């Protein structure tokens, strides 16, 4: 564990004493203990955390080995790269709640796709990436090779072809930090992303075979092997930012192995924290309390469990700052 803490951490420790603030501190301390005792951690990214520029802190978490595997949506996978190559062309709309349908239409007409108060510039963001990623897809297709979505992006980043477009300090790109470490990434439902749609368009046109892209089932098979190899000792923790498929898909690898494969020696996830503003309601997975996961064979009775019911764009960087000793 870090012995020396910086001003952000000291502020958190002094002021965050009750309610969600206290849950934030408890979760951060338990995360630190988990790593100190030899545990590994998965971080899952839902929503648009890359567009919220979580990379500023997450990239350093990756460099300092505070995370061993990431699960994210296809949007988070690609939007970190979009921010890397087109940051200066993004448009911020602080009064987004006041926009009329006509205002939204004009944003579309001008090539902007809005995510809350931030508009992604389609031409600079998507198209700067498209020709380079297509070349990798096509090359693999021609050779009869198959790779995961993130592996193609790693190849593109490490080749250096995007450096000509960089518009932020590359140290703030979590995808670049992950590529440099060859960090394992799981991307369930990658098809539900801009790049996934672009890939599908090439399949429809007959330019690429869909088998050139490994699927979610391939990800689950790969994850089961990774988990088996990394869950001994202190085990693997689960740090969930938001809800949705980025969290639900990978957490199910444990009950899948235990119940469906009947590998009864598989350990449960050994730490769990979720940051979410989803309220507990009827049938909601994102808003389900952690104890519900015990009944699904995901968490043990004794797994440390935390939920911080707050805005992940505020909470996640604070927890990461604590873990980094900032």
Image (spheres, helix red, strand yellow):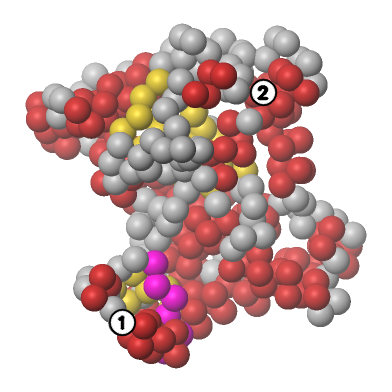
Give the quadrant of the C terminus: top left
Q: Estimate the x, y position of residue 260 in percent, counting from the top left.
A: 78, 23
Circle 2 residue: 255
Question: With respect to residue 123, does 130 lie above or below?
Answer: above
Q: Residue 168 carries which label?
A: none
Quarter location, residue 140: bottom right
Q: What element carries label 1?
A: loop
Disc nearer the start of the sequence (1/2): 1
Q: Estimate the x, y position of residue 281 in percent, counting from the top left.
A: 41, 38
Quarter location, residue 92: bottom left
Mark 1 vs mark 2: give the one in front.
1
Q: Is residue 308 magenta?
A: no
* CA distance separating discs 1 and 2: 46 Å
Circle 1 residue: 100
Q: Residues within 10 Å of mark 2 (few under 14, many from 20)?
A: many
Number of numbered labels in the structure image: 2
Q: Is residue 156 visible?
A: no
Residue visible at 46% across and 14% down in the picture: 303
Q: Estimate the x, y position of residue 65 in percent, counting from the top left.
A: 46, 32
Range shown magenta: 110-115
Question: With respect to residue 101, does 293 lie above or below?
Answer: above
Residue visible at 64% across and 47% down in the picture: 188
SS majority, magenta: strand
Give the quadrant of the N terminus: top left
């Amino acid at each position: 564990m870090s012995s020396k803490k910086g001003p952000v951490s000291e502020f958190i420790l002094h002021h965050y004493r009750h309610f969600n603030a206290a849950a934030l501190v408890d979760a951060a301390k338990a995360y630190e203990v988990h790593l100190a005792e030899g545990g590994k951690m998965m971080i899952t990214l839902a929503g648009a955390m890359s567009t919220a520029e979580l990379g500023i802190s997450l990239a350093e978490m990756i460099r300092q080995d505070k995370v061993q595997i990431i699960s994210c949506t296809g949007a988070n996978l690609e939007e970190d790269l979009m921010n890397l190559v087109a940051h200066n062309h993004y448009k911020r709309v602080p009064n987004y709640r006041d926009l009329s349908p006509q205002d939204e239409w004009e944003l579309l007409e001008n090539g902007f796709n809005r995510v809350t108060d931030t508009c992604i510039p389609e031409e600079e963001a998507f198209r700067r990436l498209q020709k380079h990623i297509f070349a990798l897809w096509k090359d693999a297709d021609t050779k009869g090779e198959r790779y995961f979505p993130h592996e193609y992006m790693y190849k593109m980043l490490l080749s250096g072809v995007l450096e000509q477009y960089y518009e932020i300090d590359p140290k703030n790109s979590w995808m670049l930090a992950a590529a440099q470490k060859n960090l394992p990434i799981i991307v369930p439902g990658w098809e539900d992303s801009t790049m996934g749609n672009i890939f599908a368009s090439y399949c429809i046109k007959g330019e690429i075979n869909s088998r050139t892209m490994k699927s979610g089932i391939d990800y689950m098979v790969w994850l089961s092997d990774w988990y088996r190899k990394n869950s001994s000792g202190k085990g693997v923790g689960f740090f969930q930012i938001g809800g949705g498929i980025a969290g639900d898909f990978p957490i199910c690898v444990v009950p899948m192995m235990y119940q469906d494969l009947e590998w009864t020696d598989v350990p449960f996830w050994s730490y769990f924290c979720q940051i979410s503003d989803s309220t507990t309601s009827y049938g909601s997975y994102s808003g389900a309390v952690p104890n519900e996961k015990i009944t699904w064979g995901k968490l043990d009775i004794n797994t440390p469990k935390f939920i911080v019911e707050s805005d992940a764009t505020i909470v996640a960087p604070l927890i990461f700052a604590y873990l980094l000793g900032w």
